[in-house]
Amino acid sequence: MPVALRVEPMVHGRAFAVWRVVVWLLLLLAAFGCVQYFSHAELLWTQRPVLASNPEASAALRVMLAWDITYLLAASVLIVLCAGCILRQAWARSALRVAAALLALWMLASGGAMLAQWPAFERASADALGQLHGDAALRQALVHARRSYLAALVLKAVAVPILLWLSWRLGAPMVRAQFRRRR
């Protein structure tokens, strides 16, 4: 006896979408960035009294603190935008499109700057490694710094197309239809 199947389109269920996974990953990375920038700003804040007697060091500390606060605020805004997209709010979709494109441009610019500085960094780390004959801990720290530098370059290179794809995908009509307007 043959079995008859009726195939109906999925109306109420949500199909798997890669863009949602990318938004979740962006949210998690922004949250990690918030923690990192906050802890670094807190560390800098505790060093203010120590460097108060040195005006040059105090000015450099204020500049680093300003950058940390700027990055902390940007990461916080990105968390809000990602959460809005996860909740399918229409206001967050267009804002996250712009933020993803700007973040891709920032990754491209900062990665280009890091790539331009790579020869100087490589020379300095090779010179430092040549001078360290017996100190294994410093040698290991230098090797770790070189690997971290390269890992940051690779991650920036991978992030640029992913962020541009996310910005493009959030503008697609099929994705746009999944977001709801405010009442």
Image: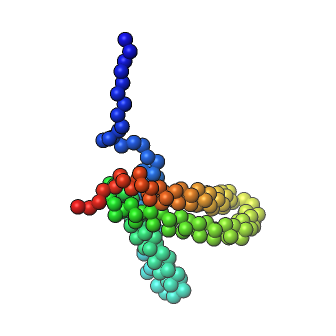
Q: How many labels were placed on the picture?
A: 0
Q: State the residue in front, 130 or 151.
A: 151
Above/below status of 1 relative to 88: above
Q: Position of residue 161 (x, y in %)?
A: 56, 58
- Residue 54 visible in this rendered orientation of the protein: no
Q: Give the color scheme: rainbow, by chain, secondary structure or one colour.
A: rainbow
Q: Position of residue 83 (x, y in %)?
A: 35, 58
- Residue 96 visible in this rendered orientation of the protein: yes
Residue 90 figure quarter: bottom left
Residue farthest toward the top in the current orientation of the protein: 1
Quarter occupied by the C terminus: bottom left
Above/below status of 25 relative to 98: above
Q: Residue at x 40, y 65 (%)?
A: 95
Q: State the residue in front, 160 or 170.
A: 170
Q: Residue at x 54, y 68 (%)?
A: 106
Quarter occupied by the N terminus: top left
Above/below status of 53 relative to 22: below
Q: Position of residue 14 (x, y in %)?
A: 36, 43
Q: Residue at x 52, y 56 (%)?
A: 165
Q: Position of residue 182 (x, y in %)?
A: 26, 61
Locate residue 35 relative to residue 12 in the image: left or right. Answer: right
